[in-house]
Image: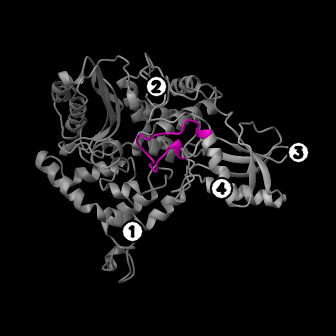
Amino acid sequence: MVVPEPRVWRAAGPHVVRAARAVQARVVHVTRAVATRSPRLTTRRLIASAAGFGLVVAAGAAVSAGPWDSSGQRTAEREWAAAQVREGGTDHGRDTGAASGAAQGAPAPAPSAPAVLAGLGGTGRAPGEQALAKALDPLLDGDALGSDRTAAVVDVATGRTLYGKGDDALTPASTTKIATATAVLSAAGADHRIETRTVLQPGSEEVVLVGGGDPTLTARKDVEGYASLRDLADETAAALKERHLDEVALTYDTSLYKGPVLHSIGPNTNLAPVTALMVDEARLDDSSSGPADRGTDPAKDAARRFEELLEDRGITTKSLDPAKAKKGARTLGSVSSPPLSVLVERMLTNSDNDIAEALARQTALASGAPASFEGAGSAIRAELKRLGFPLKGVRFADGSGLSRDDRLTAGLLTALLAEAAAPDRPELRPILTGLPIAGFTGTLRDRYAGEASGTGLVRAKTGTLTGVNSLAGTVVDADGRLLAFAFLTTGTTDPAAAQETLDRAASTLAGCGCRGR
């Protein structure tokens, strides 16, 4: 499977090595700090953790890399890793000699980076269950984690559960997004793109802006690889002028989605009204992630912005009423989102609720279910059931985890993460690479300051609601073994203490050889 590169990745290609060098000082600082705290953490282990599935500790290279190839490795990351070996080729020097197999003075071929999943077998034994329990129990039994907690740790190479605490399904908060990502990548496909289009109603001068459910559609000049409302206006205006139309009625179609547009939490800075047509997530500022004030009618706001863009291109418009594109309407223009693999990564890294709800509805559409909160939740569960995941007690009330009615188990989350690492499931790899990197990216960028042994090694999805704290992801332990973990807690009263405890538990896995029985 090959996922075409968005423009932002093509532009970033020449800067990948520069980005890696820019963060080199920080990586060295982190390595020294971790080595001080955990003498077992060697350079070999740092390399193993990077090669395990493309997790380069130099986050600058990882963030700007892309796209996916059949093994799940990013092209730019492979080039970056190859450059570090310095054995000839571009940036490798010419002191190769005859021993390299190349002509005297010519650069030797650049080596390939290790395969993404080369580290799945681990460089040592999996942790012992008793030793792991001895390391984790003091943290996970602590009062900071509230009244209910459940946990699981799985050896990704074998799928064996190494540690478990409880099997209740608890409110997962944003770790729900791991399930949403798995369902949409499986049901709709990693290559699928979401289309926004304009059509001309049959026998009329009415243009309909048809929403396809792409929350990343942008009206900004710098599109960063996402679908551009400006490009759509260019195509539409050109098509209208070919038909000698310079004055039209403009309407908009949001009929793809069903049911209420407001989440059960009501108006909230973490999520816009969920509609099939919106621009820049209906944000009223220049932000692209995190909480922000939102428009109350994203579809109408998008149509109004499109009207302005058409008028800038010489097309006069009237009316901004909702409508439905009729059968036989002729397409005037269309733009498409990046592939779902890219949207999944952005959703997980930034914990983007708007993308999460859109991807939940894409799952519903792919399976023939209504594209509503209820239909999407049912579709996610049905897709995971089809894939054979354990679903006892599991419930999906939404795709983002904002609902307190969601229920997940630690066992399900670790099973999803392990499946995403399976050699025969490269289409699920964005679930792993989209996870925030401790101390570097996304919702873990500002965490782990006091947990050096986990910095750069823990990759995890965070989850936070009032009284709820969760963390689920992957880590390479001190022996180079790739582990998946999930910690879910409810009834917490001190969110900072709960968060710190969960971070320490993940760091404990990173620093633990735990070879006992």
Figure check: 99 above or below 431: below
Among the two numbered marks 3 and 2 on one chain, the one whose residue lies closer to the N terminus:
3
Q: Which residue is mark 1?
A: 110
Residue depth check, mark 1 versus mark 3: number of the one nearer the observer: 3
**Which amino acid type is marked by label 2?**
Ile
**Which amino acid type is marked by label 3?**
Gly
- Residue 203: which numbered mark, if any? 3
The residues tagged by marks 4 and 3 sit, at their Cα atoms, a distance apart of 24 Å
Residue 217, image x, y percentages: 57, 48
Q: Residues within 10 Å of mark 4 (few under 14, many from 20)?
A: many
Residue 183, image x, y percentages: 52, 32
For this orientation, the residue located farthest to the bottom is: 104
The residues tagged by marks 1 and 3 sit, at their Cα atoms, a distance apart of 60 Å
Residue 33, image x, y percentages: 15, 51
Question: At 82% from the left edge and 61% from the top edge, which residue is drawn?
Answer: 242
Identify the element where label 4 is drawn.
helix
Q: Residues within 10 Å of mark 1 (few under 14, many from 20)?
A: some
- Magenta-colored span: 280-299
Q: Is residue 423 visible?
A: no
Q: Is residue 152 visible?
A: yes
The residues tagged by marks 2 and 4 sit, at their Cα atoms, a distance apart of 34 Å
Picture colour scheme: one colour
**Which amino acid type is marked by label 1?**
Ala
Q: Is residue 70 left or right of residue 457?
A: right
